[in-house]
Amino acid sequence: MDSFVEQLKRGTEEEFTEESAWDGSVVNTTSSSLPAIYLPLLPRYLRHPTTRGRKATEFQETKKACLNYIQDALLQHQWQRAAEFMTNYLETLENTSAEKRMAAPEVIWRIGTEILCHHSKSSIEEFNYFAERMKNLGVKRYLKVCLEHVFHLLCNGLIDDAYQNLSLAEGWRYGEQTAAQDKELKLIQAYKGLLDYYNWDKKRKAMLELDGNFADSVEQEMHSFFRQAAVNLKEIIKIPGVWDPFVKCYVDLLEFYEDYDEVRQVLSEYAYNSKFPPNPNAHVYYYQFLKRQGESKKTLMSVLKILHEIVPSHELMLEYNAMLQKSKKRKNHRLGLEIIFTLLDFAGWKEHVKAWSCLAKQIKQILENSSKHLDWVTEEWNSRKDWWPAFHFSHYLAKRNWQENESLACEKALVAGILLGKDCKYFKYVSHQGCKAKKEKFRTMKKFVKKHSSTHLRASGVLDSCTPL
Amino acid sequence: MEEEDTRDYGEPCVQCSVVNWGLTDEGRFYCKSCHNVIERTKEVLTSDVVPNTKIQSISRGFRKRKKIDKGWEWYVCEGFQYILKKQAEALQTLGVCPQMKDEILCNFWRRYLQKSKQAYCTTPASYTSKALSISDISTDMDSEPERISIHGLSSFSESDGDLQTESSFGHVSSIGNASARETTSICSGSVDGGSYLLKRKKGNLRMSMPMTLSFCYIALLWLREPVTLSDLLRFVIDGHIPYLNAFQYFPEEMKLYGVDLKIFRVESWPVYEDVHNKMSELAAFLDLPCFPAITDSCFLHPNILCIKYLMEANLPDELHNWTCRVVKKINVGETDFLTLDPVNKSARKVKYDVLAAAIIIVVLKLLFLLDDQYEWLNANFAGKRNQKNKEGCLWFDFKKWYKIIKKSVDVEQKKLDEERARCLWKCEKPLFYSAKEKSVVLKKRQMVVNLQRQFGALSGSMQVAEKQSPSSFQLNWAEENTDGNCFHGHILEGVLQEKGNSLTTMNTKYWLCTVKLCNEKICGQLTHYKESDFPQSYQFVLNLFSFLLRVPASLIHEEVCLIEHKLFKKKLHRK
């Protein structure tokens, strides 16, 4: 070692003297204002590039190759082959590289789970065995593995086993690790609460079926389940997050015991607390609860208004639209029109008869109402006239709608006729077909459209020409 | 711990007169048989560690157990001796001449121990304590040095299993380590493990796992056994010769931990060049005389190795004529060139297998040019001719040969890659750095074994792929094969022409792999092989031999360049 260092020192010294001599000559020839460049020292052993860098050991490389084979096998659903290579890969748990050794348990856990979930020879016993091993493998992942194990048990309908596992995991203590896995513990408790709720629900049904005889004891059990479930569910809901299943169960529990204030508080918190991630369901649950409670239209509408902002295509929007129509305020009518137009912007609603009939009805109302609010329609239409004809009113769609759903075609044709004029393809095709079938309602429709075809001009062309003014 | 602390107290118990002392939690001595606690405490012993212990522990010899769970006091060189013995035995079962173990390897090893001043000498090297004056120990060592002569020593077999009977080791063991042991033994199972890696004197060769193979190879070379280095390494990787986890053959009492792991644990396969370089270093270090001459009847002679590789590469026998001509032209068949002479430092230590492969490649280049054009044109010609003329000898068709070889090498390569990925590196006897780690490591090992069992059952094929019996041939192209895949009998009609009395190549051109060789001292290597710079056919041939020898293609390429430079020496110099 010493001699090596000495050699190095000597090397660098030589280097240095050479360098300084060279520097001197440079300074002499060039302007002295330029500072001389000081090249970094170049130790002798770095003078020629060597291919022998520090390579990973072959142990590491073969394990890496092995992992690649496993991944290939997994991708091709060759579970047996994957298991085969897994047998050889397991040694990576004993990796000499600390970094790899730390990462290994998780990799083994995930791959092993994947194999055991799909392998034909695998069984729930195999899986349990594996999960127990994995729990022992690293305390850092203990609760995560527990949770996944529970999910697997639940997926296989082993609810009692799952419950038992959750209880065990809940009581797990391991010094600081318990605190570090606080979130996982909360989840464990929450799922335990969920299973408590499940048992509670079973008891409730049982109680309803029993008449009197054993009802008391069953009711006792049911209450104890309720208490366990409520405590755990309440805890998890406090943490910002998306907890739909927990919230639903909790609400169900509380409503059964008629604790409506608590429900109201929980749900409004769940929907409106800005710390929680935006979650449309939170608003839906709140709305449904309020509806069950028979709250005023105003309150309901205010909930739906926010839902509309988050998810304009939500199915509750039809309900919202209906409420707005029934209202006496003009502002609300205007909003209703906007909502129904927006709804039909979404492909999922393209063939929804009710939505189209709503729109048709509303436009008809506006026209019949001396076209006072025609500008509302115009405004909505202007942003859509470029793409709605192709999106909704093509010849192809006319044909298909007519074949599949006559009433849909009828509603759409009316809207098309008004918005695009009586010459539009959709209207022409449908009314032609309708007249051929000699249906009365088509004749009235045609009449209506013809009467208001001038409004079409106003709706598109005339207003357009007005805009420059 | 307890044993260590109490072993020096030999007084019998006053109550039951048995000598079996233990330590209480407070550090007081108690009799283990009658539980009588006496006045003596552990603290009294601390004075024991100062100067006098040195002498004491030397006289104690090394049979004594260090600590109850730590086994014997042993030395790194003993570990290697065990491994060498096992390797030699394995080689013997592979059919190597029985002399190898007890006469050759054993004596090389002894010579190594002597040269590296680890044993059989007046002043054995002590790794740790420079402070230790030679006079302290020389009294014990007097009798040894005379005994050393290559053939005059007891063999490995005689010392089998019980190394400790060899007095020489007894002497080695205790030197200067009494003081060192207190510090180093904490982090190594062997006595000198800690200091072993620290430094080495200039010119001293340190043992390492690849070195064990250099030892084996040098012994094989001495015997002129028909085993090339690439064969040897292949047998090692295929598990026919102990290398990976070789420490598992140590006796139970030789505990391995701490720094010993760095010495004995194998996490990479031996590298051809590394083992080869170490071998020539070793030959020089051992100050060996000139090796037995390698004549043209020896397996390692290029003419014979070329036959082997021509067969394995499924090339026509007729090419042998040409390899011999090349060998003769560049004088690589000379005994002087081929025989290892440690004294002659300037002489290149010949890589017999690589040399033979390179000669074949040069011949292929001479005949077929391998420029991605000539060989295909020629192949088309030969192919057409073969179709027309069904009877008689078939002409060698390079294209057909390429297709067949490519297919089977690809298959074999894939198999080999998978086999490598499946390699299990750990053995049942787990290694750990310290006692603290022990429980964790053992637990992990148990876990791995359990999981292996579980997934092993799922993989269905619980059967351990039975070890293939070792063979010098990896590819087999039996003549009897009726599928016409064997090219051994094909003739070189179409690439050769008669000129005067002898046959010459039809091809009149040649291209050099490199015009100028680099300076090994400056560049670190003679040539730089970049695949994409060379014709595909050349790459293919290179890779084929790289697969057969399991060495990097660049190594063969270098040899090809060297041969070319010898072959075209005159023409190059004329320029």
Image (cartoon, coloured by chain):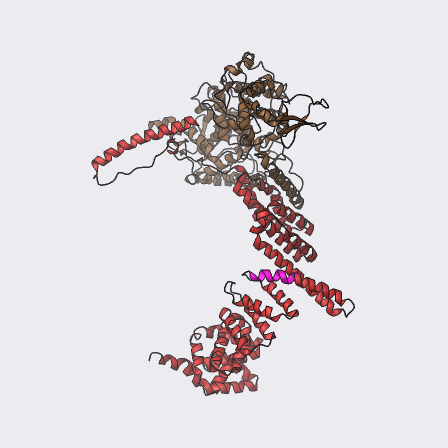
Chain colours: A red, B brown
Instruction: Give the residue displayed 60% in from the left and 49% down from the top.
Output: A142
Horizontal arrangement in the rendering, residue B510 relative to residue A140 (left or right): left
Return the residue nearer the eye: A55 or B342: A55
Instruction: Give the residue displayed 21% in from the left and 38% down from the top.
Output: A30
What is the magenta segment's predominant secondary structure? Answer: helix
Name above or below for residue B49 compared with residue B399.
above
- Most extreme residue toward the front is B39
Q: Is residue B45 visible?
A: yes
User: Disc count in the image?
Assistant: 0
Q: Is residue A140 visible?
A: no
Q: Position of residue A433 (x, y in %)?
A: 54, 81
For residue A462, which quarter of the picture? bottom left
Quadrant of the image for the C terminus of chain B? top left
Segment tinted magenta in the rendering: A228-243
Q: Position of residue A194 (x, y in %)?
A: 64, 61
Return the residue nearer the eye: A414 or A210: A210
Name above or below for residue B334 compared with residue A252.
above
Q: Tell me, yes or no, whether the highlighted magenta stretch contains residue A242.
A: yes
Name above or below for residue A372 compared with residue A178.
below
Q: Position of residue A9 (x, y in %)?
A: 37, 29
Q: Position of residue A51 (x, y in %)?
A: 43, 36
Return the residue nearer the eye: B59 or A291: B59
Horizontal arrangement in the rendering, residue B500 relative to residue A72 (left or right): left
Quadrant of the image for the N terminus of chain B? top right
Q: Tell me, yes or no, whether the highlighted magenta stretch contains residue A147.
A: no
- Most extreme residue toward the right is A213
